[in-house]
Image (cartoon, helix red, strand yellow):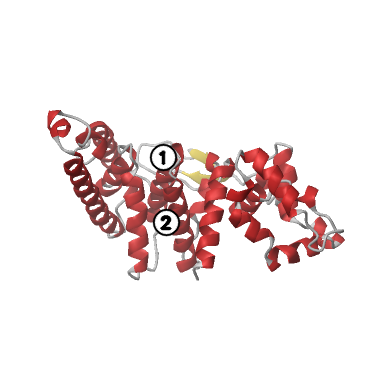
Amino acid sequence: RLIFLRFFAQIMSGYRNFIDNALPTGFNAQAFLKKRSRATNQPVESMLMIMQFIETQGFLDYLERCNNAEEFTNNLLDKLQDATGRGQSPLAIFPSHVADPEIITIADSEIEGSEPGNRHCYKSFPANARTEEQEEKRKSILALVGGASKQVPSSPAVRISGGPKAESLSPRERAAERERMVLDIKVKLQGLWLRLLRLGATEDPLSSFEYGTILALIESDAEGIGGSGFVECIREHIHSGWQCRLTDEQFIAVKELLKTAITLASSRDDVSTIRDALEVSAEMYRKDPNNVQDYVQRHLLSLSVWEELRFWDGYFEYLMENCSNK
């Protein structure tokens, strides 16, 4: 809900200054577009999608409702724009739930030789307890993957651009080599993804080889093939009939992988991967709303991508093109 509001808050920044009841439509579209043109250093002619949007009946109906005093006071879009202008957190527009977080106190289980009455306080429920052996295994896998990420043989950035053999390849051969390795990465991701979902109930996905290897493929590839390939892998699985049912532990693993993919895509200005990852996240929630206790988007609110007008402009044009094609 908040991401949707921030989308329109960025696209329609300052729109209230151009509401003019003397005009037939009630909105000075030309002045608004000129203001956006100055703010984004883009010509008005390039804003065709936004021009079409502000001429839609839906937007005109929205402006009409804004003239209603009661509707205006409950307008979350305006509240969000005001809060952002004052430097407040976007979450300030929603009613606060509880002033102080509830502190949960859990007593230690009685173990022979331990002092009775030991208690620990948590702000949330702790993760599944791991034995020392499980924790060591988890650390060794992540350390191994972290070291391998600097020289992953499947990384196109390493294999294509490095070494005397790569320098001797013709442009056509280099392109063919790159396509082969991109396909290799995607095939590996598909296999790892399916194995991650098949882990037993007693296995921790975050400490698994599958999770560590997927993370390495996402993090080690400067061109973003690992991240975009992982998102594509989930999307294809959904299209094949997957109902998006995840255990709590699997959800945490998938959420962390998607968050990493989006963060790295943001640093590369890879808008298409960010867009695809957000749509996959939303589809996972829509497929199984009664079973999923959490949703990925809530964990993405801290990312800087939401403040970038260029991202929203590109996303808006993509949505408008999709609507016109249907």
Whether residue 1 appears in this view of the structure is no
Q: Which mark is residue 264?
A: 1
Q: Which mark is residue 248?
A: 2
Callout in the foreground (1, 2): 1
Residue 281 location (% of width, % of height)? 46, 57
Residue 167 vertical placement versus 252 (above, below):
above
Residue 265 vertical placement versus 294 (above, below):
above
Q: Secondary structure at mark 1?
A: helix
Q: Nearer the viewer, residue 80 or 113?
A: 80
Q: Nearer the viewer, residue 209 or 137?
A: 209
Label 1 to label 2, Cα distance in Å?
A: 25 Å
Q: Are marks 1 and 2 in contact (CB under 8 Å)?
A: no
Residue 234 location (% of width, % of height)? 35, 58
**Viewport quadrant of the N terminus:** bottom right
Q: Residue at x 42, y 56 (%)?
A: 248
Residue 252 location (% of width, % of height)? 42, 50
Q: Secondary structure at mark 2?
A: helix
Q: Residue at x 22, y 48 (%)?
A: 179
Whether residue 73 appears in this view of the structure is yes
Which is more N-terminal, label 2 or label 1?
A: 2
Amino acid at circle 2: Asp
Q: Residues within 10 Å of mark 2 (few under 14, many from 20)?
A: few
Q: Nearer the viewer, residue 114 or 257?
A: 257
Is 22 on the left or on the right of 311, as rendered? right
Q: Which mark is residue 154?
A: none
Amino acid at circle 1: Leu
Q: Quadrant of residue 317?
A: bottom right
Q: Residues within 10 Å of mark 1 (few under 14, many from 20)?
A: many
Residue 263 location (% of width, % of height)? 45, 41
Is 236 on the left or on the right of 97, as rendered? left
Is 321 on the left or on the right of 127, as rendered? right
Q: How many marks?
A: 2
